[in-house]
Image (tube, grey):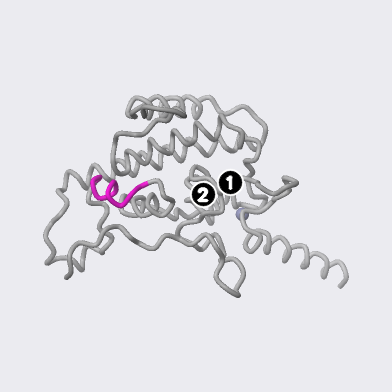
Amino acid sequence: MTSKQPVRTAPVPPSPAAGEGPPRAHDAGVSRVGGHPVLDFANTVAWRLDPARAVARVRGAEAWTRWGVAVGLLTVEGAEASSGAADSAPAETSADAPAETAPTETAHAETSATALQDLRAVLWPVLDALVEGEEPPAAAWEALRRDLVRAREDADLLPGFPLRWRPRADGLDGLRHTLALRAEDLLGGDELARVRRCEGPGCGWFFLDRSRGGTRRWCSSGDCGNRDRARRHYARTRQRG
Ligand SMILES: [Zn+2]
């Protein structure tokens, strides 16, 4: 075995594979269709609005660490400092490797991963209310308030302008606080009006609509958009036949 490999699992490229059109977004481990890290975070469950198909794309401390690095919110160093959740090698193959992670650290990392998933579950009803033009549900709003206060409490106010908070915590706790602060930016900023939810039945993914006319309907034209075209084609052929 060589020396310890940092978390460099390949980040998902934002551009489509050559020749083949865009990759099918729902099949990818890490989707970037949201165009904002908070929306990509919310999109880590595919088919969120279809209980029969819903599938968590990111689960557990290791996977969240890789996700944080892939979306650029965690540095490799910060990820390593967190928890030992950084080592991406499967446990079975590293029986001869030195133990790098104390059990309590692993337990802490898994608790932090669960807290991340709790934040995600708070953001879903808030974002749903936003795109539906409704008031956010009181319980989710209060949970969001607590997450924001906690994130600020644990952050340094960087000296200088423009004013910025930087979470003190490393690893997944820092990732959670970063996401909370970014959520505050998103929900209180100019891009708020561009947040959309994919119209694909059951999809539930969010994205920033940066199209000029504000007419984007799909998380991915190669995925939910394609399915819609197929549905309409099927309906047309049935009408004719
Ligand atoms: Zn979709």
Image coordinates of residue 34 in percent, x first then y, are 56, 49
Residues in magenta, as a range: 74-82
Name the element at disc 1. strand
Q: Is residue 190 above or below residue 236?
A: above
User: From the viewer's perspective, is residue 129 above or below residue 67?
Assistant: above
Residue in front for this viewpoint, 85 or 49: 85
For disc 1, the marked residue is 206
* Residue found 77% across the figure and 62% down from its top: 232
Q: Quadrant of ligand 1?
A: bottom right
Distance from label 2 to label 1 (Cα)?
7 Å
Disc 2, SS: loop
- In the figure, is residue 191 to the left or right of 228? left
Magenta stretch contains residue 84: no
For marks 2 and 1 on the same chain, the one whose residue lies earlier in the sequence:
2
Residue 13 lies, with reference to residue 198, above or below; the image says: below
Query: Between 47 and 40, which is closer to the camera in this rendering?
Result: 40
Quarter-of-image position of residue 148: top left
Location of the N terminus by quadrant is: bottom left
- Give the numbered dot on residue 156: none
Rendered residue at 38%/39% (across/down): 176
Q: Quadrant of residue 180?
A: top left
Residue 140 in picture, x, y percent from top left: 50, 30
55 or 212: which is nearer to us?
Answer: 212
Q: How far across and down, in percent of the image, does residue 239 sit?
A: 86, 66
Amino acid at the residue labelled 1: Phe
Pointer 2: what residue? Answer: 43
Q: Are marks 2 and 1 in contact (CB under 8 Å)?
A: yes
Residue with the most extreme front position: 160
Q: Amino acid at mark 2?
A: Asn
